Image (tube, helix red, strand yellow):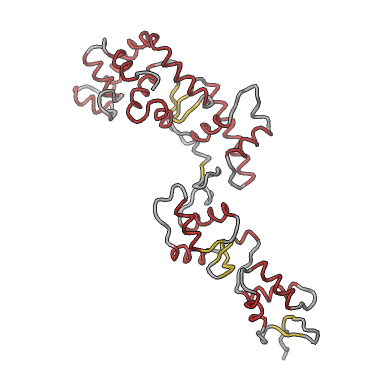
Amino acid sequence: MPYNYKQICLDLVKDLSPRTRDIVSRRFGLKKENLETLQTIGNSYNITRERVRQIESDGFRKIKPILANYENALNHFQNHIKDWGGVKKEDRLLSDLGGEKLKNQVFFLLSASDMFERCLECNDYHTLWSIEESSLASAEKIINSLLDKLKKIKSPLSKQELFDILQKEGAVSETNNFTIKALSSFLDVSKNIWQSPNGFWGLPDWPEINPRGIRDKAYIVFKDQKKPLHFRDVADFITELKQNNNKALPQTVHNELIRDTRFILVGRGIYALKEWGYEPGVVKDIVSKVLKQSKKPLTRKEIVNQVLIQRLVRPSTVLANLQDRDLFIRDLDGRYKIKTKNKI
């Protein structure tokens, strides 16, 4: 740590009255790890919550003039927040500046100084700290711009892609010194833009951003890998995802994929996404669709080539299905077509 935050806090409260020093120390966890509530402290002194608040405020009033002696430490805080775009989520800020052992001391110093503004958690943002109102306004403007863009695109984007969008629309320029690091902080404080287990950003109600089960997690895997996969490989990829706490079992994955219309079985245990153009059905169904869509009979090679676009099977499997005389017939030229039913 660049500064001895624990000693600074002790110096700031040492001249307070014993009761005021005790209340301030307990409220901010300067002696013990846990921060105590107004009610708990009030009960121990047999005074009201409001009276505890008044004593705490009076303590801060006496501390503020002494803070000037620790300007370098406060400037360090300010520069850190500025480096992250002027706003930073509280838990991450405290962790970055003080670590697990000194985060209470950092919280106390931030609270005691007029250089920083704490914004409590609301519907749209997590609890955060900012260095000036314009920083928070800038963060809100950029987040709202990205929200509008994501709603139109309807697809998760990487952080770099989000940054490129802001650059293209003029929200980012050399003059305002906005960086991808600042964007990281803005995204971190937002409750309306979430990061997926595989590192992309989007809306929290998108299954690929906020997966609620094996099926959604499998969907993330396919979108990330961009190719058909065996269900055992899908299980392995799910297990490796961030935010996944349990090992995915291959048979469970297989059972879930086969029940979800987003996934198409394209080979022996191999699945692909329907949105990639794969059609449901067994090989025989695909052969029928190929022939129905053709305006003329097709050779065995033509049929095999088109079916193999849809299914990862051996050519011999396609040819075996083609021998179903109840569905397909071969003309004198050796070409195949759908067998028409005789009308009665």
Q: How many marks?
A: 0
Q: Position of residue 299 (x, y in %)?
A: 76, 78
Q: Is residue 192 left or right of residue 58?
A: right
Above/below status of 9 relative to 311? above
Above/below status of 147 relative to 39? below
Q: Quadrant of the N terminus?
A: top left
Occupied quadrant, residue 330: bottom right
Q: Is residue 335 left or right of residue 15?
A: right
* Residue plotted at (58% across, 65% down): 264
Q: Is residue 164 left or right of residue 111?
A: right
* Residue plotted at (43% across, 24% down): 118
Q: Position of residue 319 (x, y in %)?
A: 66, 79
Q: Does residue 54 appear anywhere in the picture? A: no
Q: Position of residue 200 (x, y in %)?
A: 55, 44
Q: Position of residue 291 (x, y in %)?
A: 73, 76
* Residue plotted at (76% across, 73% down): 294
Q: Quadrant of the C terminus?
A: bottom right
* Residue plotted at (52% across, 21% down): 133
Q: Does residue 61 appear anywhere in the picture? A: yes
